[in-house]
Image (cartoon, rainbow, N blue to C red):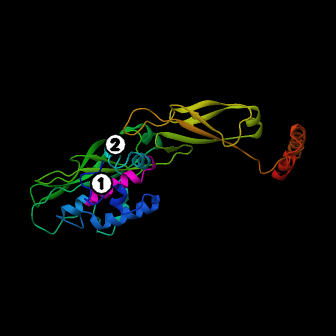
C-alpha cells in the first residue's frame, strides 16, 4: 500500500523517485539524492506538500534500496505491499546534504524568525560491532542537548540515554528516541540514531543469513576433514566430506542473524575454497607428480587436457 504522503500521481515507489522498474541501485540512490536536496523541510519551511513528498521519497528509497524489500515489493505490487516493517534508512540524507545547507541536521542552528518554534531533532551516529547489529543489543549513549528555557535563555546539558537496537539492523538504519532532542518551552525534539556497523574479520551478512569462507588444502577436500568455523555464537566444528569440490556451499541452519522485524533466525553459509601454494619443495613436487600420474591412469582416456598437465602448470 502506498504511503498517505505519496503524491496523487504516484502509482508506485518507482514513480515517487522518478525511476523505471529496472533502475539500478545507483540510479535509485541518485534519484533519491536529487529529491532530498529539493524537498527537505529545511529548504521548504511551512511547505506541507514538500514535506509530504520528502517523506514519500524517503519511504520509497528505504524499500527500493534494500534488495530483499524490493523483491518483496515487486512480487506483491504497491497495492498489497505493507511498508510498516521496513527499517527507514535515512543516513544518505546527511551524506548528500552535509555542508550544502549549512548543517541542516544540526539542532544548534536557529532560524532568524522570532516567532515561536518547535524543538529541533538531534542526530547521533552509533557504531555497533557485527555481532551487536546481528543479534540486537542495548547501548547507553551521551547526548549534548540544547535547552531553551525560558525563551532566549539557551544552554546545553549532557544526558545519558539508552537506545534499544533490534536484531538485524544494518548500516544506514535509523533508531528514533522520542523526546531525546532539543528542549524548548513549546516541545521536545526527537533523537535520530544512525547506525554504523563495523565489518567483521571473517563474517559477512545479507539479511538474516551470515556468510564466511574456509580455505582448505587439496588433501583435505579429497580425503575429507573437520574444520573450525567462526559463527555469531562462537567457533563450531564442521565436517567436510571426502571429494568436496571448491566453491561448494554448506548451510549451518539457525546459525545466522535474527530476522529484523520478524521471528526466526537465518542460516550461515560456508563456502569452501582450496589453497594452492605458490611454491613447493622438490620432494613435494615429486609427490604431486606421482599423484598426478596415478590419478591420470584412472581417468577416461577420451577426456582432453589431463590432470597431470594441469598440476604441472600450477607449479
In the rendered image, residue 57 lying in the magenta stretch gets the answer: yes
The answer to whether the residue labelled 1 contacts the one labelled 2, judged by CB atoms less than 8 Å apart, is no
Magenta: main secondary structure equals: helix
State whether residue 90 appears in this view. no
Relative to 80, is 22 on the left or the right?
right
Mark 1 residue element: strand
In the rendered image, residue 267 lying in the magenta stretch gets the answer: no
Rendered residue at 29%/65% (across/down): 103
Residue 53, compared with residue 160, is above or below; it is below
Rendered residue at 73%/36% (across/down): 221
Q: Give the range drawn in magenta.
A: 53-68
* Mark 2 burial class by Cα count in 10 Å: few <14, some 14-19, many 20+: few
**Image spot of residue 129 (x, y percent):** 45, 44
**Image spot of residue 48 (x, y percent):** 19, 61
Mark 2 residue element: helix
Label 1 vs 2, first from the N-terminus:
2
Relative to 249, is 82 on the left or the right?
left
**Image spot of residue 262 (x, y percent):** 38, 36
How far apart are the two marked residues, 1 and 2, measured between alpha carbons? 22 Å
Q: Which residue corresponds to mark 1?
A: 123
Residue 233, compared with residue 272, is above or below; it is above
- Nearer the observer, 215 or 279: 215
* Mark 1 burial class by Cα count in 10 Å: few <14, some 14-19, many 20+: many
Q: Which residue corresponds to mark 2?
A: 85
| Quadrant in the rendering for residue 297 | top right
Rendered residue at 23%/63% (across/down): 50
Amino acid at each position: 500500500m502506498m504511503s498517505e504522503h505519496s503524491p496523487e500521481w504516484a502509482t508506485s515507489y518507482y514513480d515517487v523517485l522518478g525511476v523505471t522498474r529496472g533502475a539500478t541501485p545507483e540510479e535509485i540512490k541518485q534519484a533519491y539524492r536529487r529529491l532530498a536536496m529539493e524537498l527537505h523541510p529545511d529548504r521548504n519551511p511551512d511547505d506541507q506538500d514538500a514535506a509530504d513528498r520528502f517523506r514519500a521519497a524517503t519511504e520509497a528509497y528505504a524499500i527500493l534500496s534494500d534488495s530483499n524489500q524490493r523483491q518483496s515489493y515487486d512480487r506483491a505490487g504497491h497495492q498489497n505491499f505493507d511498508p510498516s516493517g521496513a527499517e527507514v534508512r535515512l543516513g544518505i540524507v546527511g551524506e548528500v546534504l552535509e555542508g550544502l545547507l549549512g548543517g541542516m541536521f544540526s539542532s544548534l542552528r536557529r532560524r532568524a524568525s522570532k516567532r515561536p518554534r518547535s524543538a529541533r531533532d538531534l542526530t547521533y551516529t552509533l557504531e555497533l560491532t557485527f555481532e551487536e547489529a546481528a543479534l540486537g543489543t542495548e547501548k547507553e549513549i551521551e547526548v549534548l542537548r540544547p535547552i531553551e528555557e525560558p525563551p532566549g535563555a539557551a544552554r546545553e546539558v549532557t544526558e545519558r540515554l539508552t537506545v534499544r537496537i533490534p536484531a538485524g539492523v544494518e548500516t544506514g538504519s535509523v533508531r528514533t528516541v522520542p523526546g531525546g532532542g532539543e528542549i524548548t518551552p513549546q516541545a521536545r525534539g526527537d533523537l535520530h540514531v544512525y547506525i554504523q556497523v563495523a565489518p567483521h574479520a571473517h563474517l559477512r551478512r545479507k539479511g538474516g543469513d551470515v556468510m564466511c569462507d574456509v580455505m582448505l588444502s587439496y588433501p583435505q577436500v579429497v580425503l575429507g576433514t573437520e574444520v573450525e568455523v567462526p559463527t555469531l555464537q562462537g567457533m563450531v566444528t564442521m565436517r567436510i566430506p571426502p571429494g568436496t569440490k571448491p566453491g561448494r556451499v554448506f548451510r549451518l541452519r539457525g546459525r545466522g542473524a535474527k530476522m529484523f522485524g520478524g521471528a526466526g533466525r537465518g542460516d550461515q553459509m560456508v563456502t569452501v575454497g582450496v589453497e594452492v601454494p605458490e611454491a613447493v619443495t622438490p620432494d613435494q613436487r615429486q609427490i604431486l607428480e606421482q599423484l598426478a600420474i596415478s590419478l591420470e591412469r584412472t581417468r577416461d582416456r577420451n577426456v582432453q587436457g589431463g590432470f597431470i598437465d594441469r598440476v604441472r602448470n600450477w607449479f
